[in-house]
Structure formats: C-alpha cells, structure tokens
Image (tube, grey):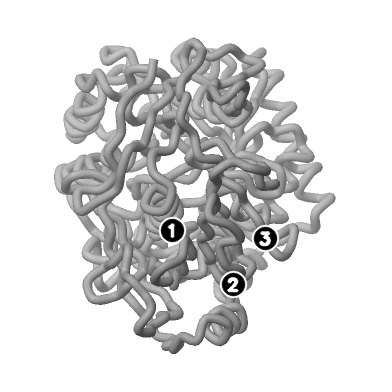
C-alpha cells in the first residue's frame, strides 16, 4: 500500500538509552515514520535531547533539553538568556478541543530567536534566526517521566497501612463510615480535563514541533478504519449482591444496546456460581480482581503478589472455561511492582491506574498518570481508567447519578476530540445499578451506541487492537512510504498530518 512519495525522514537522537526510549515512545504513540540514523544526502529533521545545531542545509534540528543543566548548556552555546519559570500551557488538538499543562519551563530569549509555537505570551518552540535550529522550552523527556512513571507510583498512606493490619477486612467497616472518610470537601469541581490529560499536551508539543519544522507527516490513526474514538465498559464486582442483583440489571441494558463489557471479579471473596460467570462471559469477558479484595495486595512482596495473582487467574479460568487475560487491582492500587507481578502471573494487560482521580483510597491523595491512552510500563500494556469511576463521582464527590452521567458525557466528548479511549468503570454494587437509577446508565451508554464513530470493545479487544497497531510500522522503499504489519493492514487507517495552527492539527485520510 503506497502512501506518500514526498517524505522528510524524522531522526530521533538522545544522550541516554532511557531518554531514547521516551522519545521513541512519543513517535510510536503517533505512529509516525522515524529512525535513529540520519540518511546521507536526504533532507531530514533531527529531534534530539542533545544540544546541537543543524549540521547541513538539508537538515533541521529540534532540541528538547533535559533538565536545567541541559537548558543552560543550550542557552550558553547559542548566546541566549535562560529564564526558568512555571508556565500554564494551552494548545489546541482540534477545533474546540484543547489540552493543558502546568509545569516548570526553561524560556529562551534573545534578539536572534523567532517564536514558532506559542501559548499566550510564552514561546514553546523558537527558531534561531537564519538557521534550521529549533529550541523547545519544555523538557518533554523529564516531564513525561514525572507525569507517567511518577504518577504510576501510588504510595500507601500510614492510615491505610494501619487499616490493613486490622484482624478483619476494611470491607467490614460500615459503608457509610468508609464513604464519609473518602468524601472530598471540594467535590466534583476538582475533576477537570486539565488534570486528566497533561501528557496529551506533551504529545501535542512533540508532533506540532515536527510539523512546524518539517512539514506534513504520515501517521497511523489510533483506531480501525471508520472509527475516531473508542469505548470500553468495565465493571468491578466487589460483592455477592453486585454479582447477583446489580450485574443482571446492567447486563440487560448492555445486551439491548449490543455492548460487550469487561467484568473484573475477585476469586475468593464470595461464592462464584459458574452460571453467573458464564452469563458474564457470554456477554463480554471476565477479568481478574485479586483474590480477597482486602486492600493488602500492594503490601505483599513481589513473589507473593505473583502467586496471589496466579491463584486468582486459575480459579476464574476453571470456573469460566475461558482464558482470563486482564487484571485490575482492588481500589485501583497501582505501582510498577504490582503491574510487573501481573505480567509474570500471565496477564496480557493491566487496567488499574486512573488518568486522574480526586482521592486514592490507598494513598488518601489525588492520583493518576495524566493520560487517557494506553501505554507500556514494566513490559505490560496499561489501559488507564480514563473516565472518573462511579465511586469518585457519586461517593467521593457526592453527585446524584443523573449529574454523574452528565459529567461522563462531558468528559467523553473531550476524549472523543482527542481521538482517545473512554474507559468507563461502573460497579454493579453501587448506585447506578439500582433499579431506580438504571435508566441513567442506559442514557449514558446510548450516547456511545448511537455514535457510528465510536468503536465499542472489551478491554481485552482494546488491548489486542493497541498491540496490533503497535506492531505496524512504516517502511521507506524507493522514496515511497508504506505501512508494513505482520497482522495485515486492512483495518489500519493511514493519515497525512498536513499542518498545525490555532485550531489544532489538520489532516487528510490516505488510501
């Protein structure tokens, strides 16, 4: 499938292997063609964390310095003034769709700098006058590490640690007392798109910088042909009542709308009738949700975590007769050791980390990774819970179910504008599964089911698709670009990103 005949290669260079991994992660997120070596005699663009100038007339260089030392080196070598400060960045992805980032930046200034990409009065990308050298004032590598890797480590609070030392499970504490301890005084006003997706702003800066310095770039769209965003409906079944009463109500709505969902079930907390689990697998898939769901999983050593997650997987597979491929930890506990244990226990994906939440029951503070898109961590695919879960909206923020549904629809509109996945988490044990509220659940799902642009899938199907897209690559032969994939290319949609401006990216579909 020949796509593009005019092509300016993108070359990624970094000072360390870890920096190189982050840069290639940006490129692989967008699925643009890239390489690590400059092609001799061809026009190309170098995106680098190492200070350098454009080596020849046929090359442009974008420098994204890492840390203050790197920024000071760039300023000194180019005779510029450096001003470290905090900045609030707002950029468009598409018309009426924005992303935000508040962070420390390194602003370069000098008479020989031309602003290329701005947010308000702050210059994100500048060009040294009379050259093809561009300077970024945002540390794309360091900020990604801080947001994603740092956000993935949800450290338990001492209060939670003490609660797990009680001779009984935290679930034995009356529900109204637990809900009161988690109630946020500021409520739903804390939940904003700005907090859910700062990493999307970093990714926008990366691609916009390349477009503004290099011209049009080919990419592979996020979802299969004809779809612009996705939905995965998920349920964490905490109690026997949720399995027996709430799940059938939610299932009835989903069946009527032809939606298959993912049901995460603890293997040793309450009786699991095989018939009930078969009903779930017939209308979706079953995922693992720990054994006892007692909050103690995160405190176990690595080997104990693996054994416990293996036990959970074996029990659920025996009861369902199906492979259990996905894991979600109780209370959305998350850190690198836990997701690594899930991989060692045989799970192919994890979905235990939110994009952002008001309050983690484990750390008793806000938590999340700041992205709505899947990403690799500890050699495992992580699918963040991108929409605020019902526990956060209804029990922590204190919203009525109808108001919570309105908020879900607002956030899903923003995620659709990004082209992202809406990962919905609704407990069959909670308010939305009650008979008097289930019509609100139907109103929510109808919003997605009626949209032909939405690709609705289970978490397992989403993991399969994201990995399939990840295996695809661009190949340049005789000056022509083509998508190459061991899985075939029929469902992969190629696009040409033609520009970036006040209304975000412009693009056209390629055959």
- Residue beneath the point at 27% across and 12% down: 256
User: Mark 2 vs mark 1: which is more N-terminal?
Assistant: 2
Marks 2/1: CA–CA distance:
14 Å
Residue drawn at the location 47% of the way across and 38% of the way down: 236
Along the viewing direction, whichever of 440 and 271 lies nearer the viewer: 440
Query: Toward which corner of the image does residue 155 lie, by quadrant?
Result: bottom right
| Mark 1: secondary structure | helix
Q: Nearer the viewer, residue 116 or 340?
A: 116
In this view, 451 is above or below 46: above
Q: Which residue is mark 2?
A: 66
The residue most toward the right is 303
Q: Residue 202 vs residue 310: left or right? A: left
Dividing the picture into quadrants, the one containing residue 270 is top right
Determine whether the residue tagged by mark 2 lies in a helix, strand or loop: loop
Q: Tell me, for residue 14, which label it has, or none.
A: 3
Q: Earlier in the sequence, mark 3 or mark 1?
A: 3
Task: Indicate which disc, 2 or 3, sits on the residue closer to the N terminus.
Answer: 3
Residue 402 screen position, x and y as percent = 15, 43
Provide residue 71's location: percent of width, then percent of height. 54, 79
- Above or below 23: residue 27: above
Circle 1 residue: 202
Q: Is residue 356 visible?
A: no
Residue 231 on image: x %, y %: 36, 30
């Amino acid at each position: 499938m020949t796509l593009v005949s005019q092509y300016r290669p993108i070359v990624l260079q970094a000072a360390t292997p870890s920096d190189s991994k982050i840069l290639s992660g940006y490129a692989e997120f967008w699925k643009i063609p890239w390489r690590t070596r400059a092609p001799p005699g061809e026009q190309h663009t170098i995106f680098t964390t190492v200070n350098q100038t454009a080596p020849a007339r046929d090359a442009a260089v974008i420098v994204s310095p890492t840390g203050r030392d790197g920024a000071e080196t760039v300023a000194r070598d180019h005779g510029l003034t450096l001003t470290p400060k905090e900045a609030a960045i707002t950029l468009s992805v598409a018309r009426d769709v924005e992303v935000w980032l508040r962070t420390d930046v390194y602003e370069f200034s000098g008479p020989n700098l031309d602003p290329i990409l701005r947010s308000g009065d702050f210059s994100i990308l500048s060009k040294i006058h009379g050259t093809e050298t561009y300077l970024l004032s945002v540390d794309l590598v360091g900020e990604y590490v801080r947001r994603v890797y740092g956000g993935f480590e949800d450290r338990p609070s001492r209060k939670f640690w003490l609660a797990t030392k009680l001779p009984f499970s935290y679930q034995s504490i009356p529900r109204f007392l637990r809900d009161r301890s988690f109630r946020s005084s500021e409520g739903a006003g804390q939940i904003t798109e700005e907090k859910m997706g700062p990493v999307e702003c970093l990714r926008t800066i990366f691609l916009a910088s390349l477009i503004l310095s290099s011209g049009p770039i080919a990419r592979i769209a996020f979802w299969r042909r004809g779809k612009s965003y996705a939905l995965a409906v998920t349920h964490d079944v905490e109690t026997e009542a949720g399995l027996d009463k709430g799940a059938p109500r939610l299932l009835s709505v989903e069946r009527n709308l032809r939606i298959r969902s993912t049901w995460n079930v603890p293997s040793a907390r309450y009786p699991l009738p095989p018939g009930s689990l078969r009903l779930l697998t017939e209308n979706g898939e079953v995922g693992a949700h720990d054994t006892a769901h007692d909050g103690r999983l995160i405190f176990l050593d690595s080997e104990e975590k693996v054994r416990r997650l293996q036990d959970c997987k074996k029990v659920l597979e025996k009861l369902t007769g199906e492979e259990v491929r996905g894991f979600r930890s109780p209370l959305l506990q998350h850190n690198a050791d836990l997701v690594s244990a899930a991989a060692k226990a045989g799970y192919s994906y994890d979905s235990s980390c939110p994009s952002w939440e008001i309050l983690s029951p484990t750390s008793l503070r806000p938590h999340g990774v700041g992205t709505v898109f899947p990403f690799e961590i500890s050699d495992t695919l992580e699918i963040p819970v991108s929409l605020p879960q019902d526990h956060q909206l209804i029990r922590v923020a204190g919203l009525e179910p109808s108001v919570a549904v309105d908020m879900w629809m607002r956030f899903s509109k923003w995620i659709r504008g990004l082209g992202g996945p809406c990962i919905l988490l609704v407990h069959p044990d909670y308010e939305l599964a009650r008979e008097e509220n289930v019509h609100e659940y139907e109103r929510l799902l109808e919003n997605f089911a009626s949209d032909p642009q939405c690709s609705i899938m289970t978490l397992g199907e989403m993991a399969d698709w994201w990995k399939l897209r990840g295996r695809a690559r661009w190949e340049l032969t005789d000056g022509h670009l083509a998508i190459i994939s061991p899985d075939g290319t029929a469902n992969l949609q190629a696009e040409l990103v033609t520009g970036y401006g006040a209304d975000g990216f412009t693009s056209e579909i390629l055959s």
